[in-house]
Amino acid sequence: MKKPVIQFENYSFQYRSQTAPTLHEINLTIYEGEKILIVGPSGSGKSTLGHCLNGLVPFSYKGEVLGSLKICGEDAKDLDIFSLSKKVGTVLQDPDGQFIGLTVAEDIAFALENDCTPQTQMFDKVAEVSKMVEMEAYLDSSLHHLSGGQKQRVSLAGVMVDDVEILLFDEPLANLDPATGKYAIELIDRIQQETNKTVVIIEHRLEDVLHCPVDRIIVVDDGRIISDMTPDELLASPVLEQCSIREPLYVKAVKYAACDITPEMKPAHLDSFQVESCKGQLIDWFTKVDSPQPREKTESVLELKDINFGYAPGNRTIHGVSFSIEKGEMVSIVGKNGAGKSTLSKLICGFEKPSSGRIYYRGQDITEDTIKERASRIGMVMQNPNQMISKQMIYDEVALGLVIRGVPETEIKERVMKTLKICGLYPFRNWPISALSFGQKKRVTIASILVLEPEVIILDEPTAGQDFRHYTEIMDFLAKLNSQGVTIIMITHDMHLMLEYTPRAIVIADGRKIADASAVNVLADSTIIEKANLKETSLFELAHRAGISEPTQFVDRFIAYDREVRQKWQ
Amino acid sequence: MAVEMLSYIERQSPIHQLTGVTKLICFMIWSSIAMLTYDTRVLVFLFLFSICVFIVSKVKLEEVAFVLLFILLFLMINNLAIYVFSPQEGVKIYGTSHVLFEIGGRYSITLEQLFYQLNVTLKYFTVIPAAILFIVTTNPSEFAASLNRIGVSYRISYAVALALRYIPDIQRDFRSISLSQQARGIDMSRKEKLPKRIKNAASIIIPLILSSLDKIEIISNAMELRGFGKNKKRSWYRARPFQKIDVFTIILFVLILLISLYVTFHDGNRFYNPFL
């Protein structure tokens, strides 16, 4: 009999500031050495569940606990956050925010320092753990200079030094590009196999986590556990769709083809997935579904010609990038972290000046224009809405740009109201911004740019940290704006987003443009995928296995069909 | 990136090798001398000495140029203000009056006033390089370790280290927020009138505070989850024992302090008077 390490019994929790419980009567047992994935939409309580394990609930976030939680046989009530931290090691979502030390070694040693470990022992332990996560060559590097994947390995090492029994990962993939995310999942898998620790992963990117096997998937919605099954069973059931969690694309495609999926088909991983019985239906579906219409060509609205740029002399970040974007297009700029995507957007907005090359707006040279002059044509929405919001009320925030430009008050009112309606914020117009959710705040920042009526909007990671429901909401809203004629450029490393919403993708690697093609074709090219840290979509492999000779057509048709279906369930 | 000013600059130099505490003690001695004395000979010596220390530290001038210029601007304003409000301060101190230019009334420029303001300027020049050096050559973590060892509670030590560590972070945030607000039309340049600019600055400060508060919540959770505050004591990965060079440096600085004080006060006056 396996030893249970986590036991929730009729466990409920209510935050002190909230009127209803966030978790209702949770009953869940996790055994030693298991690998568990917890999925659920935002606000479902899955993060709260994680906080219960590491002690942030109820020690940092106060509230009322009913029922019992036992960790390694001890009642969590009798433990404090420090003894819990010796049992449960947590890797938080945002690796940047959780770093405490200045260098890799110091950050890894932080927990040891707090235990008064003598210095020489610390050196040994840090060396040992850093080897395990393959960071031994970076011990003295500053944390700021690491890539996203390296940062994550450091934070993993930081909890590994404690010899914890349970490793808890809170959305480990949120800030990683696709290839790095894949590597992170493999690393977690390897460490679990080497150390036989219990692993709990909270994440909504199901397909990416399933890259390596997990034992069970717990689905949480509305503070309750909806299902507790093996991946094969879960994917064969309709649970995910009901909770609007994104199923793996290959599973979705097979379901669209009206095939029944059974656990025996082993759908948890594409390699093990037996598609033989569905071949006929997939081919049938492929021939039945229409392929999407290509959009018509229009005139160029923004053009970059041979742009070069470096933050310091002799150290170029952008090398001779040229591209042209047509009016009404929706384009994504993709590439790995630090490839120069954000720098490009800064150059377009005038935050930085190119060292050579020209930027044209409707054929007119705007290279020398100031930030403010460009702002009325090109709007920029930053990734973190908190970095943009400066007023307490929604109306004031959206009106700010107009007030400063000295627009008459009646016109301001009219334009703000119109924008609020477009953005679906009209019912909240008199609300304080602090009462909004993250996704709504994001919309406020989009509205505050939109009200200036720019023709081009650049968005930096518009859907970072959003679950599938909010992701669809934001992206459909942007697609609607786009259909009204606004040109949209998105900087992203989300493959789904690029594939689903932007017909065209510009790929940047090491400051150079390495591809400018349709999103599907970019993902069909393995050299580009490798250079830019992207990941092939599982749909190709599926099409291949089903014997469909035009895999890119298959992907195109799937995307078009999927969007139509999702528009219906909104 | 160029925005990272006043953060720790890693170099191999004797100054970097000193422990944080040594540097703190020396800096405090240094500032006390500069505050107490008006003796030009002492000030000139301190000034030349601090330039030497600066060169030894291998910190390049352009790395701190922005802060330096910023402080020099204030120095100018200060000098002007002294002249405007107290144009005969020098005469009062030195007891003689050598008029250079007759401007009329009390605003006539005297040699004594110029000499007095030269001393004020020198005081700035002795403290500024030392202060900047202290910040850019002290590894925040190592400094926290040293503070803790001389008896400061480790919570406070760590708070200091974190504050030092977040200087570049906050600068980065400030820059990106300021740019995005400028893109919405908030003008922070000199084209705008001052009262409006101050009002506009609020639209950068508020998001800066809000995003910093977010960060504080994350970091304090992260620290607690890794056991910070559990014990009465903690050890330090970056701790460095006192070495000979530290003892030597402190002795040197104490000597400088004693000699400066002697030179300054042996005639019973803080001021060195060349006019007698």
Image (tube, grey):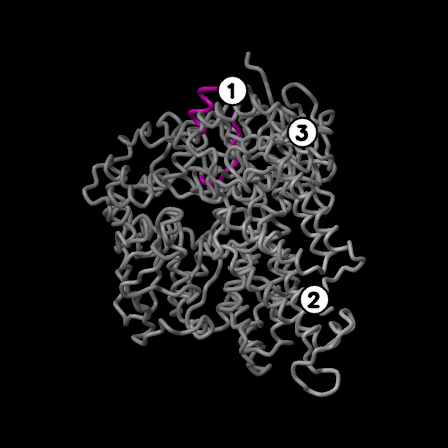
Q: Which amino acid does the dot numbered 2 rest on? A: Pro
In this view, the mark in front (1 or 2): 2
Q: Which element carries disc 2, helix, strand or loop? A: loop
B102 relative to A274, above or below: below
Residue A369 in the image, given as x and y percentages of width and height: 40, 74
Residue A219 in the image, given as x and y percentages of width and height: 53, 35
Quadrant housing residue A281? top left
Give the CA distance from mark 3 to mark 2.
55 Å
Question: Numbered disc 3: what chain?
Answer: B
**Most distant residue in the front direction:** B276
Label 3: few (<14), some (14–19) or many (≥20) C-alpha neighbours in 10 Å: many
Task: Tell me, yes or no, if residue A227 can be seen here.
Answer: no
Q: Disc 2 designates what residue?
A: B274
Q: Disc 3 designates what residue?
A: B234
Give the CA distance from mark 3 to mark 1.
32 Å
In-front residue for pair A309/A504? A309
Q: Earlier in the sequence, mark 3 or mark 2?
A: 3
Give the CA distance from mark 1 to mark 2.
83 Å
Residue appearing at x 63%, y 20% in the figure: A72
Q: Disc 1 designates what residue?
A: A33
In the picture provided, is A500 more to the left or to the right than B113? left
Question: Numbered disc 2: what chain?
Answer: B
Residue A58 in the image, given as x and y percentages of width and height: 70, 35
User: Which residues make up the magenta segment?
Assistant: A188-205
Q: Is residue A406 magenta?
A: no
Q: Are marks 3 and 1 in contact (CB under 8 Å)?
A: no
Q: Which amino acid does the dot numbered 1 rest on? A: Gly
B251 relative to A422, above or below: above
Which disc, if any, is residue A469?
none
Q: Which amino acid does the dot numbered 3 rest on? A: Arg
Residue appearing at x 74%, y 51% in the figure: B261
